[in-house]
Each structure stands twice: as structure tokens, then as C-alpha cells.
Image (cartoon, rainbow, N blue to C red):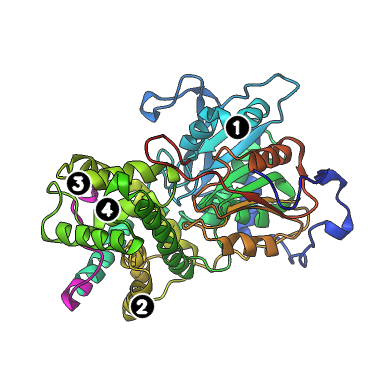
Amino acid sequence: MTATAGWAAPHSSADRHAPSAPAALAAPTGPTAEERGVALAAQRAGEKGIDWKACPQEWSQPRDVRCGTVTVPVDYAEPGGDTIDLAVNRFPSQGTEEQRQGSLFLNPGGPGGSGMAAVMTVGRNWAVWKNVIAAYDLVGFDPRGVGHSAPVSCVDPQQHARAPKPDPVPRTEADRQRAHESARAYARGCRARSGAHLPHVNTPDTARDMDVIRAALGEKKLSYLGMSYGTYLGAVYGTLFPRHVRRMALDSVVNPSNVWYENHRTQVRAFERRFGEWLEWIARHDDTFHLGSTAAGVRERWEKLLAESRREPLGGRVGPYELTELFMMTMYSNSAWVPRATAWSEYEAGRPQSLVEAARPTMEENGTAAYTAVNCNDAPWPKDLARWDRDAERLHERAPLVAWFSQRMSLPCASWPEKHGGPVDVRTREGLPPVLIVQNEGDAATPLEGATELHRRFEGSRVITVQGEGQHIATQLVNPCVNRRVDAYLLHGTVDDADVTCDRVAPPEPGRAGGA
């Protein structure tokens, strides 16, 4: 893989001078209550540290990982009030003492993803992360509301796991009204089951938690790798704590200018583009999958499959909702293309087991609840349900794969019971070092516009764009053009003199493992 900008001689962030340094905003008049609260919480955490021990068995961590907790306020404006314990883990550096550079924080996305799980994903991905693993202790944490960190809940977990769920595409006005009431009931359930903690499950408070964990680790500055939603979390951290950032790599960027309603609408269109690429790929391999020799023909088979599941759920538990979710998730990684197309082909040949098994529910109740809470708490949402329906219907005409599915996922925010502020105004503040942004050009979950916007807002940042690549998460792929630059940044703080474009990895081929 080559970079069209060339592998220019990199330079250290320490060598950057005024012309390329991030511009500072006007100084605030004084610290806010939250700023005073997080400083106090960080001081306490720094004095206490983290008591690293073998992980509890129920946390399902490998033996070479250590676990602990860090106590943080529920409300940073009232640091003397209620507290919660955040679960953290650490995979120790695999290098020599001379190689060690401290801790690298990880967040895999979501919202609702576990940073503790991300530690093991990175820690075991030797082909890509060998040099970084030698230099850093990998540190993850379950964000507030997630996993082992005061988890939120909105419905009974067994109810959440029931399938099939209602078809996300309404056929009648009664269908719309049932969806509206279901969303209202879900929002009420979030308040009833999660209580006073619920309003504080949001991105700014999670960023504040990161600073407290940083202090508990004894780190003066934070090194961070954020992916997907983790890029927005990192961008908020960099805005709130610019002087506490050592290095920050952000992969697959959430657009900080359209959190969250418009962000989801942008995703819908991007998923449709990516879905079209997959249909074309299936058509090129019709000799293997026998689903159609043109993208239009394969799409007709998809519509037929949805209609069949609408009449009678596949295997008694896979309806249009489950199929839509399965095919949407297929768009995240090329590694899913062959197995999903194979399962679909087998279904058409009268062997439904693989497709039914693949479409079983994957997101646990807590993950959905945390996703909803962060989305709804972070920013204002439209209250007019008629607008939601009009917007989804118009999107469905052009992007039918997930238009209504996406609407259903976010609809509880229309009747969310908690107050919220506006989203953080992400941008450069004094002390922020150069940030490395990595983005696949055709990513559906986090479209390219997000990286472009964050690059504009974080002055002095550098962008690596993988041309023609539609997968989600660029840094997990074996792509030397990307990998060596991420290594150079995380290990030495060096970036190219200009933004860089890399070639994509080869798409998968039937008959061999491949893709991601």
C-alpha cells in the first residue's frame, strides 16, 4: 500500500512551532462547578491510585490482565455527593523497561462499548499492534453506565432478548403509533430502572472520568486511541482537557458538528452506499452464491427475503428487524462478506440454519440502554414525532436498508425524561498537541465528513484517509501505509508534513478467508 502524499520525513510534536501550533480560544472567565469537581476527584484518585489485582472471574478477563476500580462522582458539579466505581483493566507492556511509555487508553466505540474488551482486541492483534504493545500498558475501562461500571437498564433483559422484534418499517398508521408508544415506554423504563444515575450517563462526564482515571494511574498526560464513538469521546476530552493530552489517535470519526439526530441520518445514507457495494460484490461472484448476476437482481432477492420473514419468521425468531440488523452489521467489515453471503445462499438452497443462527440478537440489554442514554443525554432531539416519521419515510425512499431501523433505535430520545445540555463545542484549545485522524473513505458507520470536520476543528491535526475503503475501523487492518504511521505517532509523536492518502486492502474473495 502506498501513500499518494509520500512518506515524508516525520517530525516530532515537540518540534512544532507557532505557524502550525493549535490556536487557542479565548480564556474562560473562571472554572465551572464541573471543572472544580473533576480537579478534586482527580486529586483524590491520584492520592489513592489503583489497587491492581487478579480480575474477578465474572469479568471474563485473561490471566495476564489485571483489574481494579476508580471512584468518581455521579455529578461532577457535586463532587461530595454520590459516587460510582468504574471498572478498569490493564494489559501490561510486552516490551523492555526502556521501551515503556506509560499507559495507552482505549475506547472501541458504541456508545455502550467496553474499553475492557477493547484491551484484549488490541492486545491479541499482534500483526498490527506489536510495536505499540511493546511500548504501552493498554488500559481500558467500562464507561459509566456500561458493563461493570454502574450499568444502566431500561427493560428486563429477557424481554430485550425476545425475537422476532416488530418490523421497523411501518405498514399502517397503527404500526407507527405502536412504535411511538413502545419508544415512550422504553424511555420511561430507563428512568424507572436506572434512577438518579441516568442523566449523568453522557459523553462529557465520561471524558471527565477519563481524566480521573489518568490521575489514578499517576500519568501527567493521557495517550489515547479512540475508535468510532471513541473518537467523539476523545475529541470531547481533548476539548475539555487539552493540556492533559500527550498523544491522541482517532480512528473512524464521528462528526462533532451534528450530534446526534443529523448524525444518524447521515449514517443511513452511508449504509445504503456500502450495502450497494456488497450487492455488486455478490453479483460478481454469482457462480459461488447464486443470488443474482446483477446488483439489482441481488437486491430483489433481499426484498423477497424480507417479505418471507414478514409472513413467517425464519426459524421462528428471525423477522425483518433481525435480518436488517444482521445485514447492517455485515457492512462494518469485509471479513463478514463471505460468511453472510454464504449463509444467505444456503438459506435460498433450503438450508436456513446458518442464516438463522447468524441473525440471533447480539447486543445485550445494557449495551442498548447505555447507547440510548448517551445519545439522548448528549444533545437536544426533536420532540415532534410526526417529523421523525416524515424524515424516516423520505430517507427510506432513497436508503431503505436502515432508514426506519435507525429511527426506531433513537426514537426514545423524542420523549426522553431527562434534561440535557447542548453538545460540547469541540475545537482546539491551548495546549492540545497534534492529533492523528485515521479514516476509511467509504466507512458507513462514521462517514468521511466526520473526519473532515474534526480536522477543521482540531488545528494542527493530520489525517490519513484510506481511499476506496468501506470498512469500519482502519487501524485494525493490516495496511502498512496506515500501520507504520500510527506506530510513528504513538511511539514517537511524529506525523507527516501533510495529510496522507493510502490505498485500501484487497476485498475478500470466496473460497478463502479474507477481508479484514
Q: Distance between the residues labelled 1 and 4?
A: 38 Å
Report if residue 76 is visible in the image. no
Mark 4: which secondary structure? loop
Residue at point 45% right, 52% down? 111
> Relative to 241, does residue 380 appear above or below in the rendering?
below
Residue at mark 4: 291
Crowd rating for badge 3 (residues with CA inside 10 Å; few <14, some 14–19, many 20+): some
Q: Nearer the viewer, mark 4 or mark 2?
A: 4
Q: Distance between the residues labelled 2 and 3?
A: 32 Å
Q: Label for residue 129?
A: 1
Q: Which of marks 2 and 3 is in front?
A: 3
Query: Do the residues bearing badges 2 and 1 touch, measured as CB atoms within 8 Å?
Result: no
Disc with the residue nearer the chain's start (1 vs 3): 1
Q: Label for residue 394?
A: 2
Query: Is 268 on the left-hand or right-hand side of 10?
Result: left
Q: How far apart are marks 4 and 2 (CA)?
A: 28 Å
Q: Which amino acid does label 1 sit on?
A: Trp
Magenta range: 153-176
Query: Is 418 on the left-hand or right-hand side of 435?
Result: left
Query: Do the residues bearing badges 1 and 3 touch, measured as CB atoms within 8 Å?
Result: no
Report if residue 85 is visible in the image. yes
Residue at mark 3: 347
Residue 177 in the magenta stretch? The answer is no
